[in-house]
Amino acid sequence: MSDFKTRLLDEKAQLDERRSKLSPFIDSEKFKELPQVQQSLLKAQYGVMSTYSVILNERIENLG
């Protein structure tokens, strides 16, 4: 496996780990205590992270 593909796999794994931690936080009571603007930004961040994960996966698959 190329170093480039390995780096992409590592990046995706780190991103997915962070995303998997953010998801339950968004469903928590602590999240509801945050100001509305922070809630909105974190939800947007989660969406962007999800899209980025899909893109990284497609790039990895495209490398073969």
Image: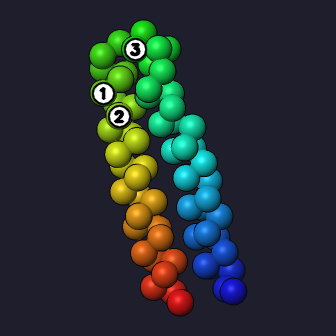
Q: Is residue 60 above or below residue 49?
A: below
Q: Quadrant of residue 54?
A: bottom left
Identify the coloring.
rainbow
Label located before the other in sequence (2 or 3) = 3
The residue that appears at 47% across and 70% down in the rendered structure is 57
The residue that appears at 50% across and 27% down in the rendered structure is 25
Label located before the other in sequence (3 or 1) = 3
Q: Quadrant of residue 12?
A: bottom right
Res. 32 mark: 3
| Closer-to-camera residue (63/22) | 22
Q: Is residue 44 above or below residue 31?
A: below
Q: Secondary structure at mark 2?
A: helix
Q: Which residue is mark 1?
A: 40
Residue 27 pos. (x, y %): 44, 26
Q: Is residue 40 above or below residue 15?
A: above
Q: Which residue is mark 2?
A: 43
